[in-house]
């Protein structure tokens, strides 16, 4: 009997582990460069909700298995005819921090490919440790759509207008060194050390008074809350304008068909 029958790939998942007062959250779909399915996004929301609501958890660490942090969304599963996207349960934490943002500090460790929602997820947290092999890209406009998970304002908050527009409009790939230079990441470490360094930072944070840490984050959030609210309130109109466009349909179709898109500006 042949032993060459292929084993079905295990579905991607997001799981979590408790380490004393730290919740380590792991994106686990390395066979697809940790691309997110709707189910994985729901699992991430559940983990962040646990971190937010459990008083014994003081710090979160978001990491990913394999060589890459994430290539972004598994597009057909979100926008194609077989889409399985479901509404987030009321009261659950939003992974992108656009609603019900997590009150606890989050340290994110990234490596390899960090595309689209990968950047938005790390910017929804507080501190980012990057491996020195990262490839960052906010490429939604290449697909005829736009960043809808917070990059349109958090990129500016972290990097300033010029550097933010440079990368948002060029849709270019850039390195860990560039991400550090413009303030998207706080530390760059040799590849393979990013998770342990993020855990080390989380342990240092967890040695401080948890309520003091939480109100420090809350106070900082208040400073930028009004501007973020206006930017978040603009998302539905932005989504309607781009997602129903011919360019969006072409961008997603060309991505699935692995060819260059031909845009018309409508």
Image (cartoon, grey):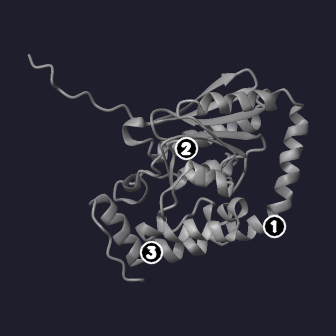
- In this rendered view, identify the residue nearer to me: 222 or 115: 115
Q: Is residue 140 visible?
A: yes
Residue 46 in the image, given as x and y percentages of width and height: 62, 39
The reply, left or right, for residue 220 in relation to residue 188 is: right
Reply above or below: 179 against 225.
above
Reply above or below: 131 against 153.
above
Q: Quadrant of residue 227?
A: bottom right
The reply, left or right, for residue 133 in relation to residue 123 is: left
Q: Quadrant of residue 129?
A: top right
- In this rendered view, identify the residue nearer to me: 178 or 151: 178
Please state which of the two labelled residues, at mark 1 or mark 2, is closer to the viewer.
Answer: 1
Residue highlighted by disc 2? 42
Residue highlighted by disc 1? 226
Residue at the spot 53% in from the left edge and 71% down from the top edge: 169
Residue closest to the far top: 1
Please state which of the two labelled residues, at mark 1 or mark 3, is closer to the viewer.
Answer: 1
Q: Earlier in the sequence, mark 1 or mark 2?
A: 2
Residue at the spot 37% in from the left edge and 37% down from the top edge: 31
Q: Residues within 10 Å of mark 3 (few under 14, many from 20)?
A: few
Q: On the rendered image, what quadrant is the N terminus found in?
A: top left
């Amino acid at each position: 009997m042949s032993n060459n029958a292929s084993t079905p790939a295990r579905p991607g998942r997001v799981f979590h582990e408790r380490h004393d007062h730290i919740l380590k959250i792991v994106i686990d779909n390395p066979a697809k460069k940790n691309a997110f399915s709707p189910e994985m996004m729901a699992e991430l929301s559940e983990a962040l909700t646990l971190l937010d609501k459990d008083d014994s958890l003081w710090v979160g660490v978001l990491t990913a298995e394999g060589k890459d942090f994430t290539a972004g969304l598994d597009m057909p599963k979100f926008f194609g005819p077989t889409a399985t996207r479901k509404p987030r349960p009321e009261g659950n934490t939003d992974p992108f921090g656009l609603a019900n943002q997590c009150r606890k500090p989050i340290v994110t460790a990234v490596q390899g490919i960090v595309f689209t929602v990968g950047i938005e997820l790390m910017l929804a947290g507080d501190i980012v440790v990057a491996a020195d092999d990262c490839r960052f890209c906010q490429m939604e406009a290449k697909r005829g759509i736009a960043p809808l998970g917070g990059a349109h304002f958090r990129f500016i908050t972290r990097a300033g207008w010029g550097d933010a527009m440079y990368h948002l409009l060029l849709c270019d790939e850039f390195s860990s060194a560039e991400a550090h230079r413009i303030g998207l990441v706080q530390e760059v470490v040799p590849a393979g050390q990013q998770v342990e360094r993020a855990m080390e930072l989380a342990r240092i944070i967890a040695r401080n008074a948890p309520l003091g840490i939480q109100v420090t984050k809350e106070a900082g959030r208040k400073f930028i809350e009004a501007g973020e609210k206006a930017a978040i309130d603009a998302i539905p109109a932005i989504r309607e304008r781009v997602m129903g466009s011919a360019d969006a349909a072409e961008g997603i179709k060309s991505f699935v068909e692995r060819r260059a898109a031909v845009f018309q500006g409508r």
